[in-house]
Image (cartoon, coloured by chain):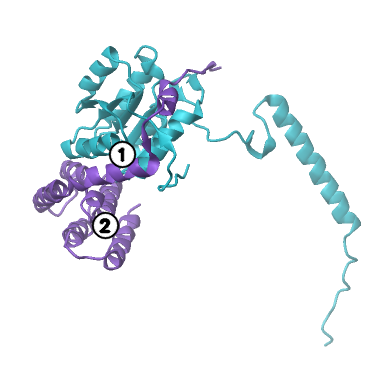
Chain colours: A cyan, B purple
């Protein structure tokens, strides 16, 4: 994901409609300076979840940068609402979540709200640009799975852990293979076992 | 058994980024950094105000565990994270993150350590001192990390 800060490669954010949600005026100013510096011209600045919902219901959003809004974590609730309640295409909008700090009690909420990626504050412009380009390039699928609605968060598909699938047949096959390997190891160990050492006793 | 559905939506941002014109990466980053530099005086003032608020909350905490008071202190500290890097004292962001970690640990375990909280606030003031180098700040930040990790 690393970006060469001296690159002359071009990108264009001018036509992107960007929703910004941050409850703190300073946090919002920092976001605005970064995003306008990167070339975005249409910004919807929202200080509350209600404002953000209003924007998402009435305008097409190309990118959302949403603060988690610690300590309440309302920002995560907004992202979940966006994924589950907003109409297309906004329900699929790339969402970057920013966070100053995530309390332990909010980690699962942050993980499962449906954002594409979480950026820890302080935010450097280079990091923000890297993440924007990343969420735009990936074209990852969206998952609707039980309580989770959002982008597929796997960075790469390495297959099942240890090469073992989750189906019952896979587990049985793995267990059988494990038992066969163990039996073979035992047989080999017995075949190669050293001769018993003679008992040595101290002469009295 | 849960049902999983995959959708492959077309992301408009992908096409927008490719449209002709726009900015070179180097120029865009320079513009963004220049924009952030204009916020430096405001960030310094905001951090100083937050520090005063945090010290006032800390003074009212008392010697025993006070969940509401710690929540108030957390709410003040968390607002400052991100401002330090903009105003040229990135150590403040680290110190505030450590303070938020500490408060989170204390609230989770129902404990209180006034010294541990107090040292973070004193460090916050120190790290805002003009002319403090990164090398000077490093041992302070390492110490704060040890304090907050002690309660993890």
Q: Which residue is the site of mark 2?
A: B91
Residue A196, quarter of picture: bottom right
- The answer to whether residue A70 shows anywhere in this view is no
The chain letter for the residue carrying disc 2 is: B
Q: Which residue is drawn at 21% across and 21% down?
A: A51
Q: Is mark 2 on a helix, strand or loop?
A: helix
Q: Check if mark 1 and mark 2 are on a common chain.
A: no
Residue A59, quarter of picture: top left
Which of these two is toward me, A37 or B10?
Answer: A37
| Horizontal arrangement in the rendering, residue A6 relative to residue B111 (left or right) | right
The chain letter for the residue carrying disc 1 is: A
Q: Residue at x 17, y 49 (%)?
A: B40
Q: Position of residue A168 (x, y in %)?
A: 69, 25
Up the image or down, B103 lies above or below A158; here it is below
Q: Which residue is the site of mark 1?
A: A99
Q: Position of residue B122 (x, y in %)?
A: 17, 61
Which of these two is toward me, A118 or A38?
Answer: A38
Which of these two is toward me, B104 or B75?
Answer: B75
């Amino acid at each position: 994901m690393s970006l060469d800060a001296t690159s002359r490669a071009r990108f264009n954010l001018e036509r992107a409609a960007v929703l910004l949600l941050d409850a703190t005026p300073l946090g919002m100013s920092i976001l605005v300076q970064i995003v306008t510096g990167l070339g975005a011209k249409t910004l919807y600045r929202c200080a509350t979840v209600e404002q953000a919902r209003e924007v998402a219901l009435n305008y097409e959003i190309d990118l959302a940068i949403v603060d988690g809004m610690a300590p309440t974590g309302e920002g995560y609730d907004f992202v979940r609402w966006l994924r589950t309640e907003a109409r297309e295409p906004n329900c699929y909008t790339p969402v970057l979540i920013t966070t100053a700090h995530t309390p332990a009690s909010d980690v699962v909420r942050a993980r499962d709200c449906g954002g594409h990626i979480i950026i820890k504050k302080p935010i450097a412009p280079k990091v923000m640009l890297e993440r924007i380009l990343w969420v735009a390039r990936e074209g990852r699928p969206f998952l609707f799975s039980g309580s989770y609605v959002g982008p597929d968060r796997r960075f790469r598909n390495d297959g099942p852990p240890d090469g073992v699938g989750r189906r019952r047949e896979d587990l049985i096959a793995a267990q059988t293979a494990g038992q066969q390997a163990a039996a073979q190891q035992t047989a080999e160990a017995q075949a190669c076992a050293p001769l018993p050492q003679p008992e040595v006793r101290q002469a009295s | 058994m849960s049902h999983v559905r995959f959708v492959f939506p077309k992301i408009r941002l992908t096409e927008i980024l490719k449209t002709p014109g726009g900015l070179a990466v180097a120029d865009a980053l320079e513009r963004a950094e220049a924009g952030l530099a204009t916020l430096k005086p405001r960030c310094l003032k905001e951090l100083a105000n937050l520090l005063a608020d945090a010290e006032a909350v800390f003074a009212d905490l008392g010697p025993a565990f006070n969940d509401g008071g710690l929540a108030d202190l957390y709410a003040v500290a968390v607002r400052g994270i991100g401002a330090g890097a903009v105003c040229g004292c990135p150590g403040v962001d680290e110190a505030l993150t450590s303070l938020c970690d500490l408060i989170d640990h204390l609230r989770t375990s129902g404990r209180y350590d006034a010294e541990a909280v107090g040292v973070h606030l004193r460090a916050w003031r120190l790290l805002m001192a003009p002319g403090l180098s990164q090398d000077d700040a490093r041992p302070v930040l390492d110490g704060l990390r040890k304090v907050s990790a002690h309660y993890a």
